[in-house]
Amino acid sequence: MSSKMEPGPDAPSDNNNDDDEKYGGDFKVTPWEVEGEVDYNRLVEKFGTQPITQELLQKVKGMVGEIHPMLKLGYFFSHRDFDWVLDKKDKGENFYLYTGRGPSGMVHMGHVMPWIFTKYLQDKFDAKLLFQLTDDEKFLYGQDRTREEIKKYTYENILDIIAIGFNPKKTRIIVDTKHIQHLYPLATEIAKRITFSTAKAVFGFNNSTNIGMIGFPPVQAAPCFLPSVIEGKNTPVLIPAAIDQDPYWRMTRDVADRMGYYKPAQIHSKFLPGLGMLGKMSSSRPETAIFTTDAPEVVEKKVVSAFTGGQPTVALQRQLGGNALGCPVFWYLRYFFDTEKQSDERLLKCRSGNLLCGECKSDLAKGARPFVAEFQKRREKARDVIPMFMYDGRPLEE
Ligand code: TYM
């Protein structure tokens, strides 16, 4: 692995606004919309990121002793400067983690995935974490949510974040409308360096976009540099998130040098598919998403009605085998509940026609019901400890 001193220039990523060119024609990935069957290799190329290599996995293993299954199985598949952050850590320079949530609804299992991974990084690298809730973004985007609704979801989402089990001494939650005074000085510095033309190219804004949305991206960029302000010295930051958030980081990396900060590093995940046919799990299609607050019988019902990669009849399934890789039930089991070995066996059995969809659904229901029940208990306990997690200028503990 090349051991870089400082993050170098990014590979060119095309910023034109032609959807077909930009998204590969048959799928679309923006911070607000994911549609179609995403070709992740193409995204690496289009967004100008780096694939996660075996060498990088071995570096992680060497440093912390274990590779998280989401890394090993390729759920986290791409990065920018993750290797650089690890090199810094190796040399004794700690990094911050930064991730977030747009509180537009209740939390589903897709959202939880990067957070579980973030907790692993926090535990293994003893890292401090800033967690941003972009309640402003979710009010500004679209027409349909009142500020009261967003406020309710912000509170509910905070319970989910705490339920993940982040270290309260090393984690601070930032709610944009509540803590804006800590972000605004940085956001204005960032905003001053970004033209409307760049914002249009990166985010696809047009003349009908409300000006709140046009002005929002620097607010999501600001926590990339806040650790340097908190620590009083230039501090590396690593952002674990699904790849839909990447346009924000491309923009932020562009201005970092000019502001005298390190470029924020990223590690990108794929999307957990919805239980419907294609696309990411999304709150806007609640029947295809398992929410952390779903009752056990609701989880069961969603799993039973899930789309699968199976054939229309049992006879055909036995004869032709199923399409596990195009099956959301398979991916759920792989990332959440199966061991790698179990998952590989499931893949073979499905493809050879020796496994019926009913069995996989039943395995998924068996895994998801207790997972959600346990998570709900942790959410309840979280109600009492919210103040410990909120950003208030207190230093985070070493
Ligand atoms: P939001 O609320 O859309 O998503 C929160 C996190 O979940 C990821 N994500 C998914 N991951 C896997 N499968 C899915 N189906 C899926 N859907 C969403 C997102 O990539 C994200 O990591 N603007 C942001 C909030 C934000 C943020 C950040 C996110 C502010 N600062 C820093 C990541 C990092 C948003 O609306 O996320």
Image (cartoon, rainbow, N blue to C red):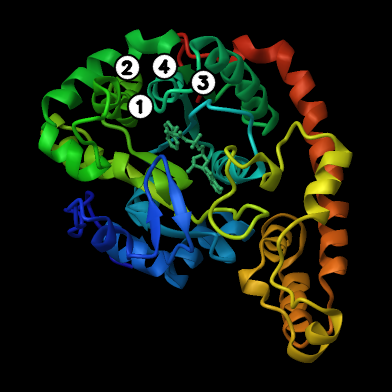
- Assess whether mark 3 and mark 1 are in contact (beta carbons under 8 angstroms): no
Hey, what amino acid is under mark 2?
Leu
| Residue identifier under label 4 | 176
Q: Which of 369/64 is in front? A: 369
Between discs 1 and 2, the one toward the N terminus:
2
Q: CA distance from mark 4 to mark 1?
A: 10 Å
Q: How many marks?
A: 4
Indicate yes or no: mark 4 CB to ligand 1 under 8 Å: no
**Residue drawn at (31%, 33%), measured in percent from left and top?**
235
Between discs 1 and 3, the one toward the N terminus:
3
Residue 47 locus on image (x, y percent): 29, 57
Badge 2 element: helix
Residue 262, visible in the rendered structure: no
Hey, what amino acid is under mark 1?
Pro
Q: Which of 179/58 is in front? A: 179
Which mark, residue 183? 2
Hey, what amino acid is under mark 4?
Asp
Badge 4 element: helix
| Residue identifier under label 1 | 223
Q: CA distance from mark 2 to mark 3?
A: 13 Å
